[in-house]
């Protein structure tokens, strides 16, 4: 939220998801209620804007992990448990994704 200048109470944030990306990066995402509807684009963002679920520009999101977390939150994941996904390269050199926790997907789904 720091990239959008969003104001929120960190003590009230809920752990939403943890994503391990090919052993190169781990992302930990939280859900929190905003204390203001003012957002501004920071140094790492081109623009910042709040959307109703039906208006989210899904195809324009920069990273698949943002989409995963937003979809999980939209579908009731906040407070339901931590979504965990691991993206890895299989023995044939193809990217795969394994999911653990709530909303289990079929393990070994190509991504």
Image (cartoon, helix red, strand yellow):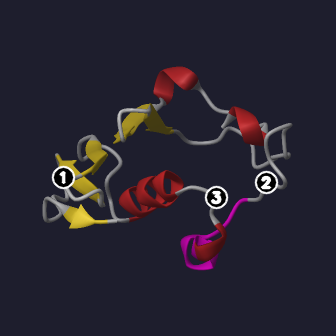
Helix, strand, or loop for circle 1? Answer: loop
Mark nearer the N terminus (2 vs 3): 2
Instruction: Give the Cα distance between marks 2 and 3.
Output: 12 Å
Query: Which callout, 2 or 3, points to the residue nearer the camera?
Result: 3
Q: Who's the residue at 26% across and 55% down the image? A: 97
Query: Which callout, 2 or 1, points to the residue nearer the camera?
Result: 1
In the displayed orientation, state which residue is furthest to the top.
11
In the displayed orientation, state which residue is furthest to the bottom.
54
Asked if residue 58 lies left or right of residue 3, the reply is left
Identify the image quadrant of residue 57: bottom right
Asked if residue 30 lies left or right of residue 44, the reply is left
Helix, strand, or loop for circle 3? Answer: loop
Q: Residue at label 2?
A: 48
Identify the image quadrant of residue 44: top right
Instruction: Give the Cα distance between marks 2 and 1.
Output: 40 Å
Which class describes the residues within 10 Å of circle 3: few (<14), some (14-19), or many (20+)?
Answer: few
Q: Who's the residue at 16% across and 60% down the image? A: 108
Bounds of the magenta segment: 50-58
| Quadrant location, the C terminus | bottom left
Which mark is drawn over residue 91? 1
Query: Which callout, 3 or 1, points to the residue nearer the camera?
Result: 1
Q: Residue at label 3?
A: 62
Labels 2 & 1 near each other (Cβ < 8 A): no
Which class describes the residues within 10 Å of circle 2: few (<14), some (14-19), or many (20+)?
Answer: some
Mark nearer the N terminus (2 vs 1): 2
Instruction: Give the Cα distance between marks 3 and 1.
Output: 28 Å
Q: Who's the residue at 66% across and 37% down the image? A: 1
Percent of width and height locating residue 93: 29, 56
Q: Nearer the viewer, residue 56 or 22?
A: 22
Helix, strand, or loop for circle 2? Answer: loop
Above or below 86: residue 105? below
Q: Nearer the viewer, residue 98 or 29?
A: 98
């Amino acid at each position: 939220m720091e990239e959008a200048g969003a104001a929120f109470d960190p003590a009230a944030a809920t752990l939403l998801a943890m994503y391990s990306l090919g052993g190169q990066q781990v992302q930990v995402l939280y859900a929190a209620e905003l204390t203001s509807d003012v957002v501004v684009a920071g140094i790492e963002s081109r623009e910042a804007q709040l959307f109703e679920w039906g208006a989210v520009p899904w195809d324009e999101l920069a990273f698949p992990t943002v989409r995963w977390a937003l979809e999980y939150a939209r579908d009731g994941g906040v407070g339901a448990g931590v979504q965990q996904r691991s993206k890895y390269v299989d023995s044939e050199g193809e990217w795969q994704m394994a999911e653990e926790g709530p909303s289990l997907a079929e393990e070994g789904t190509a991504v």
